[in-house]
Image: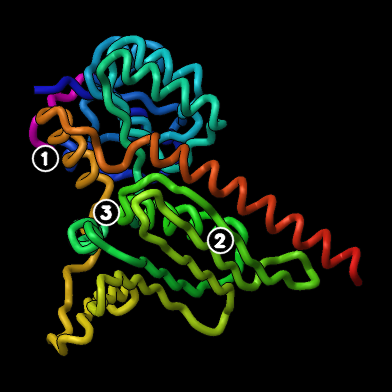
Amino acid sequence: MLSAAIILPGDTEMFTFNSLRTIQGVEWEGIFFSGKRQHPAFDRSLIYSSPEIIPLICDLLIVVDPQFCTMEYLSFAIRNGCHLFLSDKICLTSEEQKQLILLANEGDTYIWIQNDFLFHPFHKKIRIASNHADFIEVLQTSPSKKELADKILNDNLLMILRAADSLVHMVEVFCGILPSGETEILNVHLNFKSGSAATLKLKFSEQEVRHLLSIHFGEEITLYDFGQNTINYLPKNRAKKSENAMPSNPLLDQIGEFVRNIEKKNNPGFNLNDEMTVFLLMEKIRRKIENQFNYNTLAS
């Protein structure tokens, strides 16, 4: 049984604490939230007035408030033996991520990054289907909001890395830039040390919304349609298969999965190593986009 504590955003609506109690394998020891909002469902005896106390009383620390996802606070928690479940809003440099990974490895603790998209039921099947993939292809179209575009790029790169299950050998980036400087089309091609390859194509348009992943193995293709929530198998003409939609509360499900990983001493599937790799890839992609925009500006 793990002792657990959670840091909640102080002034946002959250699920009731009773839903947290449904997670098996944990015993709740503490809650901290920074705002003035009252949470009447909470057991007042569990609420602490100082965030510094929280890492001292638990084995598992869940940090849903991104303002506490800092290098100073997280390293303090790891040094006190905490496993960390972190908000997907963390903002750490690559060097800070490396330091946290080293600290966690030294302390034999695990780190899980919240990612609701990568907890879609498709992903367990994708990991199995892509085990011997020759080629992975992703196409997504969406509105061109910068914050949304960064999230889409990050999630798709994480999905490809986990599907390929190999180190990146080479990255090529091709992009189409509008006169305003916004990216209209982005193509990222990845070669992996295993010999497989992947292509990610993002189209930013208000006209259509699609999200497709195809995994190629020989002449067989498995096509995952996230918009329609279906899987197609080609060319065997197998029937289209519908899948379960996203869990109603993916955050709770992810915490539960992380607890099971800790109990079995399995390195979690959504960890800081992958985040760091994607962080570095995204830096390369951003530089390519900036160089392309500067070249187009000079040429005009």
| Horizontal and vertical percent position of residue 69 | 46, 29
The front one of 22 and 244 is 244
Marks 1 and 2 sit apart, C-alpha to C-alpha, by 35 Å
Q: Which mark is residue 119?
A: 3
Apparent side of residue 17 relative to residue 158 in the rendered image (left or right): left
Element class at badge 2: helix
Q: Secondary structure at mark 3?
A: helix
Q: Alpha-carbon neighbours of circle 3 within 10 Å: few (<14), some, or many (≥20)?
A: some
Can residue 116 be seen by looking at this rendering? Answer: no
Closest to the observer: 161 or 183?
Answer: 161
Label 3 amino acid?
Phe
Is residue 274 at least partly visible in the picture? yes
Residue shown at the point (34%, 37%) measured from the top left: 271
Q: Which mark is residue 149?
A: 2
Rendering coords of residue 243 (x, y %): 17, 72
Residue drawn at the location 32% of the way across and 27% of the way down: 84
The answer to which image quadrant residue 108 occupies is: top left
Residue 220, given in percent of the width and then of the height, sits at 23, 78
| Gap between marks 3 and 1 measured at Cα | 19 Å
N-term-proximal mark, 3 vs 1: 1
Q: What span is colored magenta in the figure?
A: 22-29
Decide: is 287 above or below 70.
below
The reply, left or right, for residue 265 in relation to residue 192 is left
Q: Which residue is mark 1?
A: 22
Q: Is 92 on the left or on the right of 48, as rendered?
A: right
Could you tell me the amino acid type at mark 1? Answer: Thr
Horizontal and vertical percent position of residue 176: 68, 71
Q: Which mark is residue 195?
A: none
Total tally of numbered discs in the picture: 3
Q: Which dot, 1 or 2, sits closer to the camera?
A: 2
